[in-house]
Image: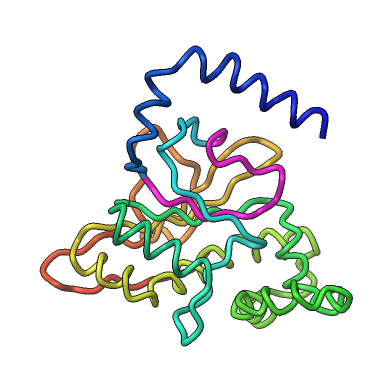
Amino acid sequence: MRKLVQGIHHHHDHIVAARKSFFSELARGQAPRALFITCSDSRISPNEITQTQPGELFVIRNAGNIVPPHGPFVGGEDATIEYAVAALGVPHIIICGHTHCGAMKGVLHPEQLTPLPGVAAWLSNAEATRRIIRENYPADLGEEALLDAAICENVLVQIEHVQTLPVVAAALARGTLDLHAWVYKIETGDVLAYDRERGEYLPLGDDEPRPFVARTRGGAHATAGGRP
């Protein structure tokens, strides 16, 4: 705790003190550039990865960067996405998985979650990911390769889930929202983005990445496509 408290004092005395006008402006409201949905893993820092300032990202974090599909129960993810899209008008939703994801290890090995019933229940929202790996990837591929595949597949599964939310479907049809599927590599700092035309994850270049699900025009609905 000492390190955390010291960090708070440093932030107040040095960061905020040196940028008073910036933080005063932040207090007036927010207009984030994107909604960034990623894992709770302590090694992932959305603002560090994207080099963004306070106020530029609206963030959802949970085990496995999961978005439950639309249903009768409204959870925190639904409400936060609805607020980001309908109230803040974010033009982009990024779902970002990461290498060495413990949640995806749990998805691949649900028997290990017996002492963690809450985690097991939450990760049932990635059941499609587990079945995709089990039924489409050879078991002798190796544990590490299967985990990497699950991480990549899960981002695409969650991209499909987020499109079931009415507020997202409406924004896509209205032409005001793009969806992006990313994977962050902890060990190198690289970010891979799913290229729908090529059907694979590719390193982000200097140009603005093409969205996996693009905003549409004329009322046509965008739908998720192929997999790696």
**Residue at left 70%, top 42%?**
43
Depth check: 21 or 140 in front?
21
Image quarter of residue 14? top right
How many numbered discs, if any?
0
> Percent position (x, y) of residue 181?
47, 56
> Percent position (x, y) of residue 15?
55, 18
183 is higher (above) or lower (below) than 199: above
Q: Quadrant of the N terminus?
A: top right
Q: Which residues are magenta?
A: 34-49
**Does residue 73 appear left or right of residue 23 in this picture?**
right
**Residue at left 30%, top 72%?**
169
**Residue at left 65%, top 81%?**
131
Question: Is residue 50 covered in magenta?
Answer: no
The extreme left residue here reads: 218
106 is higher (above) or lower (below) than 198: below
**Residue at left 43%, top 18%?**
20
**Does residue 15 appear left or right of residue 58 in this picture?**
right
